[in-house]
Image (spheres, grey):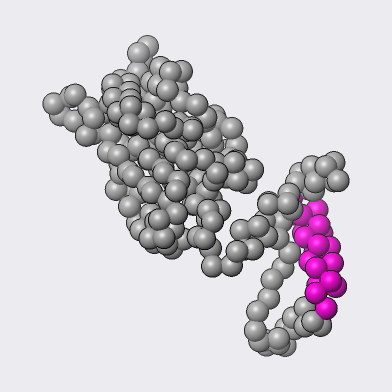
Amino acid sequence: MLRIDIISGVPGLLQSPLEHSIVSRAREKRAVEINVHDLRDYTTDKHRKIDDYPYGGGAGMVLSPQPVFDCIEKLTGERKYDEIIFTAPDGELFEQKHANELSIKKNLIFLCGHYKGVDQRIRDELITREFSIGDYVLSGGELPALVMTDAIVRLLPGVLGDAESALTDSFQDGLLEPPVYTRPAEFRGLKVPEILLSGDHNKVDEWRSGQALERTKKRRPDLYKHFKKKT
């Protein structure tokens, strides 16, 4: 079973997404154990502060090293972690290949950044991987941690109802998914492509492959170029 520990200064932001949908189902099936740690429980400050002003001046507050070191050292003293991940706007762009890689690990820690940033000593001494989910700034690392957790958890064995579902998602083979349709075969004069109603699985697979290529070429030329290089 995969264990994920998420460290946050505002743990309330994490509650609802972890208690619904795929992630909740995975927890119920004991495919994953997810623990949320409130950084304020680890601070030695009598006012439960976890941040302070940056040396050298400037706007914003910086996450203090003391509660983060104490929290992570407590966790790593109890078990070995495969990765200690910091969610940072200047981190490596999180992609499907990373979700695949992390889904086969045993123990992961996510440290959610907040305020202006975290004391650099935390990143230098504790963090093993840094990820960003895109070129924009959020108020904290809680949402990126949830995004990555969801991407990882849905890959765990037995979590999804259809065993093939995760394997055919967009990006798994480097391409976007082809169009999908469901009943009725005709709706307001709009018809499902005849090939999907043919019952010929080989032709359907061929059509889907072609559509995936065309959609990727049109919508994500960067992915298409990378895919063509590999093939």
Q: Nearer the viewer, residue 185 or 140?
A: 185
Q: Nearer the viewer, residue 58 or 106?
A: 106
Quadrant location of residue 10?
top left
- Above or below, 129 relative to 35: above
State the image coordinates of residue 84 (x, y, percent, origin top left): 45, 31
Quadrant location of residue 60?
top left
| Residue extent of the magenta highlight | 200-220
Magenta stretch holds residue 207: yes
What secondary structure do most residues of the magenta stretch adopt?
A: helix
- Above or below, 206 relative to 166: below
Q: Is residue 121 left or right of residue 132?
A: left
- Above or below, 107 relative to 189: above
- Above or below, 186 relative to 158: below
Q: Nearer the viewer, residue 212 or 59?
A: 212
Count of numbered circles in the view = 0
State the image coordinates of residue 138 (x, y, percent, origin top left): 45, 40
Q: Is residue 187 visible?
A: yes
Q: Nearer the viewer, residue 155 or 150?
A: 155
Magenta stretch holds residue 219: yes
Q: Is residue 57 left or right of residue 192?
A: left
Quadrant location of residue 209?
bottom right
Residue drawn at the location 66% of the way across and 86% of the way down: 184
Residue drawn at the location 30% of the way across and 28% of the way down: 74
Residue drawn at the location 72% of the way across and 68% of the way down: 179
Q: Is residue 60 visible?
A: no
State the image coordinates of residue 102 (x, y, percent, origin top left): 54, 41
* Residue located farthest toward the left when viewing the structure as drawn: 46
State the image coordinates of residue 42 (x, y, percent, origin top left): 23, 30
Residue drawn at the location 60% of the way across and 45% of the way down: 100
